[in-house]
Amino acid sequence: MVKRILLVAFPDSIHTARWIEQLTDQGWDIHLFPSIGGDVIHPLITKITVHRLLNSKKMPAFPKERSIGLKRWDYLNNVFRKYILEKRFPSIRAVQLSRVVDKVKPDIVHSLEIQAAGYLTLEAKKISRGKFPPWIVTNWGSDIFLFGRLMVHKEKIRAVLAECDYYSCECDRDVTLARDFGFDKSVFPVFPNTGGFDLNRLENVRNKVLTSKRRTIILKGYQNWAGRALVGLRALERCADALNGYTINIHSAYPDVAVAAELFSERTGIPTRIIPHGTPHNEMLFLHSEARVSIGLSISDAISTSFLEAMVMGSFPIQSCTACADEWIEHGVSGMIVPPEDPDIIEDALRTVLSDDRLVNRAAEINWQVSLERLDNAMLKKKAVDMYNGLLNESY
């Protein structure tokens, strides 16, 4: 009998796509229900069935994906879905998910993320007619670490953890937080949600330029409710005297960060480059392989993907203290762990990293060994597959 898995997740997310990539060669019947949106499916999501709220006449052909949903005209989608269906009938997505569960009868339901997918699955479970399948909840990023401190989310998170059967996350920190919220069931092994890296292929790329010889710096450009790229840019400006010959590459830049970067270059003469949104993953890895330092600052995160990319590619990571970096690097040895909103401390860290060739070269060696032990894609794929197999074997 074919084993069936229903994922509830952001359909346009690279993280969703990379998770699914690990599963599509196992002979399982995999279904995806969009936790939000549904018009845009990430191009790396293939060989699965997508249950959209509304289904385009221009749906892609299988084997890329098979789409199921109410028929609609493309140009009316936003109006019909956002302003009629979901505004007038806010529970319609939960109703449709419950119907998909009842019809598809998955062996496992897996919510990838809590604030959208977890809450939605909880509502669907409440109205589902039959016995609800075993339910895995995966914690992404700030799902508990930040939102768990906000009054509007505390009881919702507690309710999700009370109703789900299994919990997974990528930080030991978040296991403790889930337990604090009352979760007393099974926790899967802690490992990154985005899968691993082809380390055999990347080894030669990362070794082309010794870290101490590199003259670019990467800054993660998020400036929003969590991201603090402008603090990083301010710290870089204060280090301008030590940045002669360097270029600053900023990826995932928000508009105000792009403006600030242009002004930074005008004031300091240090060139900045905005890496286009949607830059392929392999190109991002190459950029880290050319960087001496990679900076990521936010008030909340789990294991930042850009942080792991820096580790793998030999760039010295400077990461905010809110992102489980202490579970991967030793401060002052294989990276720097800094407060996300203190440009003074970040400046001091940068000056150390810019002036100490031995530090950055040794850190690259240490982080490569950690990567071999913890970030190999085949190893992490096996962990993901084993996670499902354990449950699927229990159900038969």
Image (cartoon, grey):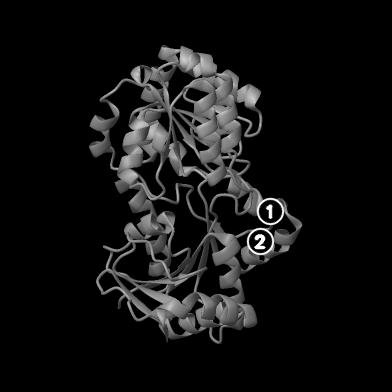
Observer-nearest of 391 and 332: 332
Label disc, if present, on residue 157 of the rendered structure: 2
The answer to whether residue 99 is left or right of residue 17 is right
Kindly tell me whether residue 295 is visible in this rendering: yes
Label 1 CA crowd tier, 10 Å (few <14, some 14–19, many 20+): some
Front residue of 41 and 264:
264
The residue at the point 54 percent across, 43 percent down is 222
Residue receiving disc 1: 148
Image spot of residue 297 (x, y percent): 56, 36
| Number of callouts | 2
Can you say whether 229 is above or below 94 in the image? Answer: above
Looking at the rendered structure, the secondary structure element under dot 2 is: helix
Q: Which residue is drawn at 51% across and 78% down?
A: 97
Mark 2 Cα within 10 Å, few/some/many (few <14, many 20+)?
A: many
Is disc 2 in contact with disc 1, using a CB cutoff of under 8 Å?
Answer: yes
The location of residue 78, given as percent across then percent down, is 50, 74
Indicate the position of residue 356 as horizontal and vertical percent values. Answer: 46, 12
Tell me the kind of residue under disc 2. Ile
User: What is the distance, in whole Å, between disc 2 and disc 1 at their CAs?
Assistant: 7 Å
